[in-house]
Amino acid sequence: MKTLHMIRHSLPRLLRLVPVGAVFLACIASAAPVPDKPPLPPVRVPKTEQGVTQLSDEQMKWLLDAKFGMFIHWGLYSGPGKGEWLMENQGISPEKYRKYALPESGNDYFDAKDFHPEEWAALAREAGMKWMCLTARHHDGFCLFDSPHPNAFTSQQTLGRDLVAEYVKAVRDAGLKVGLYYSPLSWRYRGYYDVTGQEMLPNKFGYTQNPSDKESARLMKEENYVNVKKLLTGYGKIDHLFWDGGWLGQKGTDAAGAFFHEPGQYLDPRNEWPVPAKYQDLEPGTNKPLGIMGMVRKYQPDAITNLRYGWVGDITEEEGGRETKGPIRDSVYQDKCMTLQRGAWGYDKRAQSEGKTVSADELVGYLANCAVRNMTFLLNVSPDRHGVIPEFQQQQLRQVGAWLKKTGDAFYGTRGGPWQPADGQYGYTYKDSTVFAHLLKGYAGDSFLIPPMGRLKVVSVHDVYTGKPLAFTPRDGGITVTGIDRESSPADTVIAVVYDQPVSNVWKN
Ligand code: GLC
């Protein structure tokens, strides 16, 4: 009280003492109070939408712990090698597009002859990745699995092989989590652009409006239902499902296509695009026909799904190679997906010959930017028509893996925080009694200030990459770390601050 009283009385006098007073006041104004501990992380409350509830934190744990996964875009389009959108880009009819499944297309023939998924899995492990996700069917509608639907176009028909079965076995055998990508969008159905049969949306295939398009759209949905059920029931435990392409006629949002796809818990008996009774999967007990996520939760209750079938998803996606920015995503889980080959996700001969590949150093930056925001990172590779991941892509992955061998402790099993990151500069992860500060390329300098951690005491500080101890001195309730070597690991210099008790204690009274 006495001090406050004194300040109140002396301030007017100080104001008159210019310039000394001005400097003094400026100091008071700019020195924002340093909180004595990090703010409480927000609580994530699983949402229920369309009758389906998001997975619990316990069910999401493996993904957040895993941090880094391998995405694989591979399919018929890997034959011509012009990216996975070739069919649409060039408006190639389904009849013509089939040729890539036939030896007569020569160097454009998708023969899968060197497909050894155990090599992919070994590479993923070497890269420090903990799960894999393969395009079981992309937008061209070609299934890499043996679909029981009469309209399906599959690798079983063209190669006599269920490639998904081979992949799933190899991934599981390697001790990695199994992911599958599936696109409800299929360019093999003209009805995709005209689900009502009354309005043909712009398309490159030359389709014009026809009332029969409504039935074509319904068939597309029916095939999806049968395919999804096969993927959920035919391949053992699936850990991750990446839906992609719920939007209709390549317009609007995935959520806006939900009235058609029925991605929720049940199928509506009054829906205008009905799945016939013979294909319907019923809920035990009620005998109500299940929707897409209804089937997922019935057969794969722990599979983590994203939002692109039109249901809210257990995770959202940040897609593409722009730098990840902004605050920690801790009330909504977010995955970043991007492709190692610059440009297309599927094999692109041109990008390959021009060496358009993201470098290992850049990948480290991407991974760090995800981890400090509590996000996961799904990095795509583009195998060629034989099933081989281009050597240059492999090299980048191996380099990241070698780096993670030294620094993995600052990633696996950590959570983003406890403090917010500074875009392009630095951020933090934590686990047990350690906080890891990640100093990125944009942060200049060889010293770093670690904010206060309440009653937690710093025991030691070291450079995670070199393993060397670092000097530190008390500062503003926290510490200043000095003499940091910024050269050994410039893309992400990782500093471990070890406390005398678990970091989570900082939020306990
Ligand atoms: C983009 C691409 C698509 C790819 C997807 C992966 O949407 O257009 O082909 O499968 O990204 O997230």
Image: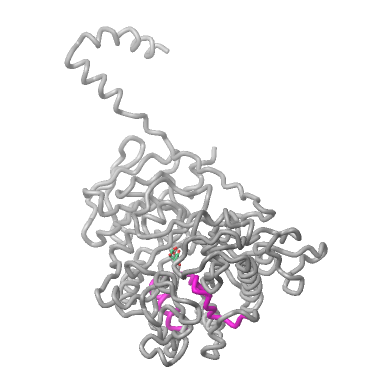
Residue at 50 percent across and 57 percent down: it is: 251
Instruction: Pick out the residue farthest to the left.
Output: 19
Q: Quadrant of the N terminus?
A: top left
Horizontal relation, residue 50 to residue 403: left or right:
right
Instruction: Pick out the residue farthest to the right.
Output: 285
Picture quadrant of residue 221: bottom right
Picture quadrant of residue 229: bottom right
Q: Quadrant of the C terminus?
A: top right
Check the image and report above or below for 190 versus 146: above
Residue at 51 percent across and 60 percent down: it is: 201
Magenta-drawn stretch contains 212: no
Check the image and report above or below for 362 versus 349: above
List x then y, in percent, for residue 264. Answer: 66, 58
Residue at 68 percent across and 64 percent down: it is: 273
Q: Is residue 206 visible?
A: yes
The one of 479 and 369 positioned closer to us in this rendering: 369
Image quadrant of ligand 1 equals bottom left
Horizontal relation, residue 250 to residue 367: left or right:
right
List x then y, in percent, for residue 450. Answer: 34, 44
List x then y, in percent, for residue 482. Answer: 24, 48
The one of 105 and 474 positioned closer to us in this rendering: 105
Q: Is residue 61 visible?
A: no
* Callout count: 0
Check the image and report above or below for 115 versus 447: below
Magenta-drawn stretch contains 137: yes
Magenta span of residues: 118-147
Check the image and report above or below for 93 versus 286: below
List x then y, in percent, for residue 447. Answer: 24, 47
Image colouring: one colour
The one of 269 and 29 positioned closer to us in this rendering: 269
The one of 16 and 258 positioned closer to us in this rendering: 258
